[in-house]
Amino acid sequence: MSRLRQIRSPGFLAPTLDAMTRVSSLSRDELKTRRKSLRRRRRVSISQALWRFWALSGLTAAIFWGATRPVWLINSPAQINVTGNELLSDEMVQSLMPLTYPQPLMKVEPEVLARQLRDRAPITTAEVTRQLLPPRLNVKVQERVPVAVVLPVGKADGSDTQYLQAGFLDAHGAWMPLASFGLGSASPQLPTLQLRGIQPHYQRYWPQIYETIVGSPVAITEIDWHDPNNLVLETALGTVYLGPYSPELEQQLATLDRMRNLPGQLSESEVARIDLSNPDAPSIAVVDTADPKASSAQTDSDASP
């Protein structure tokens, strides 16, 4: 066999043992340094996280502790500030809030109070917020505005259950008890329109009826609906019979408006009633002066222009 000769390139220098040892030593030192640095960073990161956790926990505990101290208590209704009320007195709204005194401010549940206030009072919307300085509750309300007084019908004690009991109606037909507006130091301005004998299942018609009546040029002071087959109005021209409620109410009131010259032709004492059950053929019942017992005769309403 031929001998193999080791041929070295002129530019190639084999690494010496000393150089290899030095490189290996430097690599180990760098690795140790990096490991130490990573461990140090990890310890710092954990320490910072723990510090933030304990700081936040301490702050939360301090706030809760401070909020439950006597200085953060609702001690009386005087610390309930009411806004937005015009008919309801501040005292009434305060009395309707189910709170026991003293009450820690932070234990008050605003949403629960607002919901219970809407259920107990003639209020459409209620908003309750807490205030720390000074400690109090702020209550903002929007009231139901009564537009008609509901009068009792039937038995002497007004307990006939087929009709709405004495109270108020708003423009949407929502009923409110008489006591709703009775606690104020000053009597609120209550409606002058009176409604007698409305049955609960007819409440859904009230918004349309009220809107039409409000727009009538002839003043209407009372509505009697105890007979569903005859809606009766007390007006500036006298008693008006409309028959059963129907969408013709607007036309009936327009016909009544055209009869506004009636007082110039007949005195109020002579008019027994005006019948507009057929708005195209209205009639007037006049008192028969020959019979003082108020027998009436039917006449055409040619007195209207």
Image: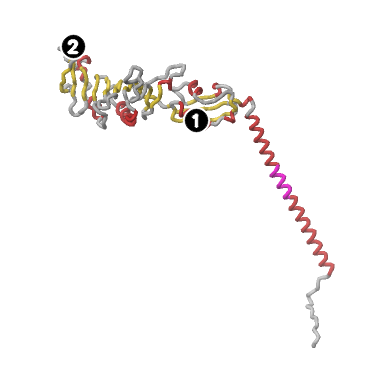
Q: In which quadrant of the rendered image does the C terminus lie?
A: top left
Occupied quadrant, residue 134:
top right
What residue is shown at x 76% (from left), y 55% (from top)? 35
- Indicate which disc residue 292 carries: 2
Occupied quadrant, residue 276:
top left
Q: Position of residue 30 (x, y in %)?
A: 78, 58
Mark 1: amino acid = Ala
Mark 2: amino acid = Pro
What residue is shown at x 65% (from left), y 35% (from top)? 60
Q: Confirm whether the magenta stretch covers residue 178.
A: no
Q: In the orientation shown, which residue stands out farthest toward the right? A: 18
Q: In the orientation shown, which residue stands out farthest toward the bottom? A: 1
What residue is shown at x 58% (from left), y 30% (from top)? 107
What secondary structure is marked by label 1?
A: helix
Residue at the spot of label 1: 114
Front residue (pair 73, 23): 73
Q: Measure the C-alpha gap from mark 1 to mark 2.
A: 61 Å
Front residue (pair 51, 9): 51
Instruction: Give the magenta-colored segment's residue range.
Output: 41-50
